[in-house]
Image (spheres, rainbow, N blue to C red):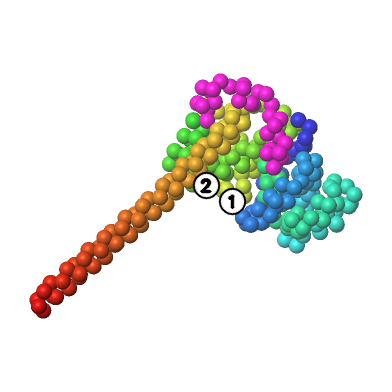
């Protein structure tokens, strides 16, 4: 793969640029609406521009590793940082530089932005260029089913795992970022290594996942890095099944409520009709008494 150039460390869990930045500077996560705006911006970029952005953010993160002034994070947007530190004709297209959805982002969100772009790199570029030894065709159907079922059992039916890991979306996003990092041309990774060793790294998770949360993860040692792609696809299928089932339950509940309302309305009409008949009968009896 020659599409991207991952600069960070995956060989030693104690050496991590992302963790260094998080420890030195406060980092925040985008709110949902902010994330939607950024995704809309990224949706309109071509592959080369996405990769330019990724490389630019790696440059900024590497620079921040050497900075002692903590105010640079809170006081600077990406735009102001670029003006002061990067020549305008290098690294990135001016149209991207000047786009407010990108340039107005403060550096205290830079890691969340970088991780979001990693996921886009997977979706738009890497998913169509997965190594042969990681693809489904390298495993039998039985092997795929066994691995995915084991993994889902370990995260969805483990009473001891942190609640944040029972949401399949966080795993799907993590696997996309992990695969982007693993498949960088600079990486010389043993894909027979245990997956558990990698998912227990704090730098592979979003900033709101704590070390204590991560310690609750227990992945069978027989599940390896080479299984990451088929697990990702298995989780996406499982998530779709859960969404379909949830939509069906919601639809059934709506239909049941409508049915109950119809029965209630019919009962009310019957009661009113009965009361009306009784009143009419009473009027007739009273009329006979008068005569």
Residue found 76% across the figure and 51% down from its top: 64
Residue 81: quadrant of the picture: bottom right
Can you give x and y, in whole percent of width and height, for residue 48 in the image?
80, 41
Image disc number at residue 164? 2
Image disc number at residue 208? 1
Can you give x and y, in whole percent of width and height, for residue 193 in the image?
61, 27
Residue found 75% across the figure and 38% down from its top: 6
**Callout 1 touching callout 2 (CB < 8 Å):** yes
Q: Is mark 2 on a helix, strand or loop?
A: helix
> In this view of the protein, which residue sits in the foreground, 10 or 103?
103
Q: Is the magenta stretch mostly helix, strand or loop?
A: helix
Location of residue 127 with respect to 141 vertically, above or below: below
Residue found 35% across the figure and 56% down from its top: 262
Residue 151 in view here = yes
> In this view of the protein, which residue sits in the foreground, 229 or 71?
229
Image quarter hosting the N terminus: top right
Q: Does the magenta stretch include residue 167?
A: no
Disc 1: CA contacts within 10 A as few (<14), some (14-19) or many (>=20): few
> In this view of the protein, which residue sits in the foreground, 55 or 71?
55
Can you give x and y, in whole percent of width and height, for residue 143 in the image?
53, 23
Give the mark, 1 or 2, whose residue is nearer the N terminus. 2
Residue 10 in view here = no
Residue found 29% across the figure and 62% down from its top: 268
Image quarter hosting the C terminus: bottom left
What segment carries the magenta color? 120-148
């Amino acid at each position: 793969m020659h599409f991207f150039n991952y600069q960070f460390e995956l060989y030693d869990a104690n050496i991590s640029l992302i963790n260094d930045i998080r420890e030195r500077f406060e980092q925040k996560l985008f709110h949902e609406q902010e994330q939607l705006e950024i995704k809309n911006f990224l949706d309109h970029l071509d592959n080369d521009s996405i990769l330019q952005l990724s490389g630019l953010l790696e440059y900024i993160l590497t620079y921040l590793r050497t900075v002692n002034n903590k105010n640079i994070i809170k006081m600077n947007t990406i735009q102001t940082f670029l003006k002061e530190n990067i020549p305008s004709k290098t690294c990135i297209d001016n149209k991207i530089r000047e786009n407010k959805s990108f340039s107005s982002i403060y550096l205290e969100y830079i890691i969340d932005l970088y991780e979001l772009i990693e996921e886009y790199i997977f979706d738009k570029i890497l998913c169509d260029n997965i190594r042969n030894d990681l693809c489904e065709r390298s495993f039998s159907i039985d092997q795929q089913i066994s691995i995915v079922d084991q993994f889902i059992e370990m995260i969805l039916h483990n009473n001891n795992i942190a609640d944040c890991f029972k949401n399949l979306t966080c795993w799907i996003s993590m696997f996309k970022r992990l695969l982007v990092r693993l498949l960088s041309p600079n990486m010389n990774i043993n894909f027979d290594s245990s997956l558990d060793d990698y998912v227990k790294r704090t730098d592979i998770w979003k900033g709101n996942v704590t070390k204590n949360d991560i310690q609750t993860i227990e992945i069978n040692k027989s599940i390896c890095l080479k299984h990451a792609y088929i697990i990702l696809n298995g989780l996406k299928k499982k998530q779709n099944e859960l969404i379909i089932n949830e939509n069906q339950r919601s639809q059934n509940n709506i239909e049941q409520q409508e049915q109950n309302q119809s029965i209630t309305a019919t009962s009310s009409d019957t009661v009113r009709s009965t009361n009306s008949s009784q009143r009419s009968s009473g009027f007739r009896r009273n009329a006979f008494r008068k005569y």
